[in-house]
Image (cartoon, rainbow, N blue to C red):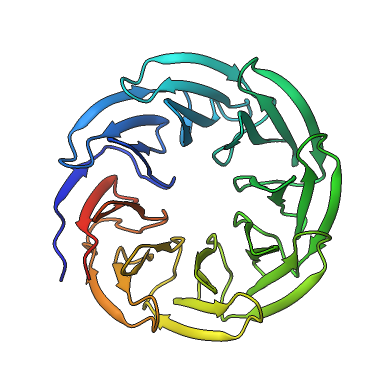
Amino acid sequence: MRRPLWIHRGAAAVQADPVLAGDRLVVCGVDASVCALDPDTGAEAWRRALAGTAASAAVAGDTVYAAVHFTRVGKPGYLAALDLAAGAERWTLEATGQLQAPPEVADGVLYQAAVARGRTDVVALDLGTRREIWRTPLADVVGARPTAAGDVVLVSCYDRCVHALDRATGAVRWSAGTGNFIAAPPAAFGGAVFVGSYDRSFHCFDLADGAPRWRHPTGGSIYTEAAFDEDRVLFGSWDGHVYALDAASGRLRWRFEAGAEVLSSPAVGSAAVFVGCESGTLFALDRETGSRLWAFEGDAAANPAIKTRPALGGDRVFVGRMDGQVLAFSAAP
């Protein structure tokens, strides 16, 4: 069994993806804490206790953009911009709803979904002026991070659809439906959009117009975001498997049995694919075949479930768990 290089024991569950940015590993807790760890040692460089419940973050340049889910039950969340090096607060901005997912930052614009009364406003914010560029209302909940792809922003919605919004105006370009609600962020690759749904299928749509290209059924709902490895698209399912499909056709290339629900999005490294599951086991899989290279098993006495995408940097892989631990491993096969 692979042993961790270091373990950081936090007080709150980690269910938002850790973000590695230079010499800082940014980790958010369900208690709305944000901390930066030294990726070499796991020591805390800084910690901020934000007011509210549950935080997630994106990093762009020297700034951490933290989204706080809500401040009190029924009240909206807010964005906090923090200095990456020291954690100092630069500004905060109250949202018009609850922020259930991290923002997307691209080309100086922040895209965020704010949920209120069962509806969602997708907002584009100019980070230079902190002024709203556009706001697009959707009729249901968006619980996943928006994805900027070319000249559109892709959002997954509980109305069973992926919506493509014009990045300049926010106008809805197209909407593509699945058989059940979607909680996973959409991913774009090679002129196509890939997303898993609670209809137990993984879907591929054309990026230009949303036309269906193919669908691959699985034995469980799909909560995880896709990853890409050359001509393969990878994802995990609640049926306890990690799938690698041909991105062009949807044909199965390999499938790995994890033995528990796969709630972690895969991360593709130079030598392996890394993914975690409900049992707390972190797997390193061969990129070409999906065979197991090594694993680290969680302590069943705790709550070690891994719901985060592993973060990769250099020769290391980092993962957060629901028991509050953040662990670092050698990424070598």
Position of 270 compared to 245: left or right? left
**Is residue 15 among what the camera can see?**
yes
Q: Specify the quadrant of the image occupied by residue 84.
A: top left
Q: Nearer the viewer, residue 159 or 104?
A: 104
In which image quadrant can residue 89 be found?
top left
Say if residue 237 shows up in the picture. no
Residue 148 in percent (x, y) is at 65, 45
- Quadrant placement of the N terminus: bottom left
Q: Residue at x 75, y 75 (%)?
A: 213
Q: Nearer the viewer, residue 250 or 139?
A: 250
Q: How many marks?
A: 0
Task: Judge by depth and name the residue closer to the eye, 315 or 75.
Answer: 315
Position of the C terminus by quadrant? bottom left
Q: Position of residue 255 (x, y in %)?
A: 46, 83
The image shows residue 50, relative to residue 221, as above or below, that is above
Q: Position of residue 78 (x, y in %)?
A: 57, 24
Query: Within the image, what quadrant is residue 32 found in?
Result: top left
At a point 60% along the width and 35% down the height, the residue shown is 99
**Residue 230: horizontal and vertical position, in percent?**
50, 70
Tell whether 262 sits left or right of 124: left
Vertical arrangement, residue 264 with respect to residue 241, above or below: above
